[in-house]
Amino acid sequence: MKQFDPNNINGVIPAMITSFNKDESINKEGIRKTVNYLISEKVDGLYVTGSTGETFLMSQEEKKQAIEVIVEEVNGRVPVIAHIGSIGTKITTELGMHAEKVGVDALSALPPFYYGFTNEEIFNYYSDISNSTNLPITVYNISNANLMDLDMLKRLASIENVKGVKYTAPTHFNFSKIKKEIGENFKIYSGMDEMALSGLISGADGIIGSFYNLMPELFVALYTNIKQENISEAKKIQEKINIIILYALSKSGYPFIKMGMKWLDVDSGCVRRPFTTFIDKEIENTIKNDLKKIADQNDLSGIKFLDAI
């Protein structure tokens, strides 16, 4: 199976949803459809079993199963980054070793959270992950798990296999500091969908996000325009993205994404409780009518999931 150089894992990387059946079992066929749809839309990689993948609502065995199906279906076409993070080191390293065995290209891990771990304990957590794998590791820096400062990131970057950071916070001015003080080869993936443009302009190597599942063509177009230095066009695309995201979040993010993908004939299945799957046809029709109005008012033609309504 093709292995990707971590220096070449850049670009548009959806934080992939995990498909579930109505009984909350793993929907393998839905996972395969999602993989193939995203790859057909020219994404540059997949970030799997992360927050968007409902990882904290899954058992360890279910995460392993999802990773296995994804790697098999991808079949080396794009790099796969498996998120393995949890509160416990043992749980995290066990999943990481399994992910490496089945053929992922890189790992990512949220820092241990909830108990208010010290910086020393967080450092040891990432050091233990590094000692358990030969794969590159991307630290996941997000406010939900106590955002780490630059000094801590610099310290983590000293660990052998730590090669980058998924940075999910609006403080993009730190990107230049990270590159300057840690090194140009230290990867930065911007993790805020609404600020993909800002992240790329600020020096991110790639962008990772949830709504890339629903409208990958917009994020690919945004990234392409940035690479071509067409900032004004990229700005217009980001504005369109944000109009949709703001509406979607008013309804519920992950259920909205899965519902919209269903309109594309990509059966992404259900969300897991306590999330609520949209099953009421009247509610769905109201959302469709709202989106038609929003599309007409804001010139959102050409967005595939909206055109499918």
Image: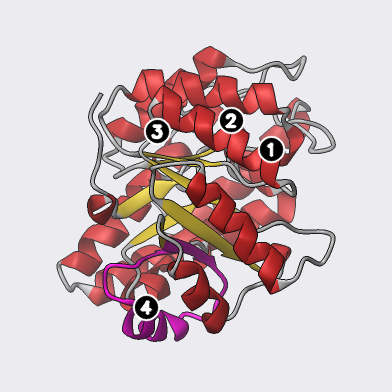
In the picture, measured across the screen, residue 109 lies left or right of residue 299, that is right
Q: Any magenta on residue 83?
A: no
Q: Any magenta on residue 183?
A: yes
- Residue sitting at 31 percent across and 64 percent down? 205
Q: Which structural element holds mark 1?
A: helix
Question: At label 1, which amino acid type do we have?
Answer: Ile
Tag 1–tag 4 contact (CB < 8 Å)? no
Q: Quadrant of residue 249?
A: bottom right
Residue bearing the label numbered 3: 104
Residue bearing the label numbered 4: 182
Q: Residue furthest front?
A: 131
Q: Which mark is residue 91?
A: 1
Question: At label 4, which amino acid type do we have?
Answer: Ile
- Residue 54 x %, y %: 67, 38
Considering only vertical position in the picture, is 239 above or below 292?
below
| Mark 1 / mark 4, whichever is N-terminal | 1
What span is in magenta? Answer: 164-190
Question: At label 3, which amino acid type do we have?
Answer: Val
Indicate which label's residue lies in the foreground, 2 or 1.
1
- Mark 2–mark 4 Cα distance, whole angstroms, equals 33 Å
- Mark 2–mark 1 Cα distance, whole angstroms, equals 20 Å
In the picture, measured across the screen, residue 294 lies left or right of residue 165, that is right
| Mark 2 / mark 1, whichever is N-terminal | 2
Question: At label 2, which amino acid type do we have?
Answer: Thr
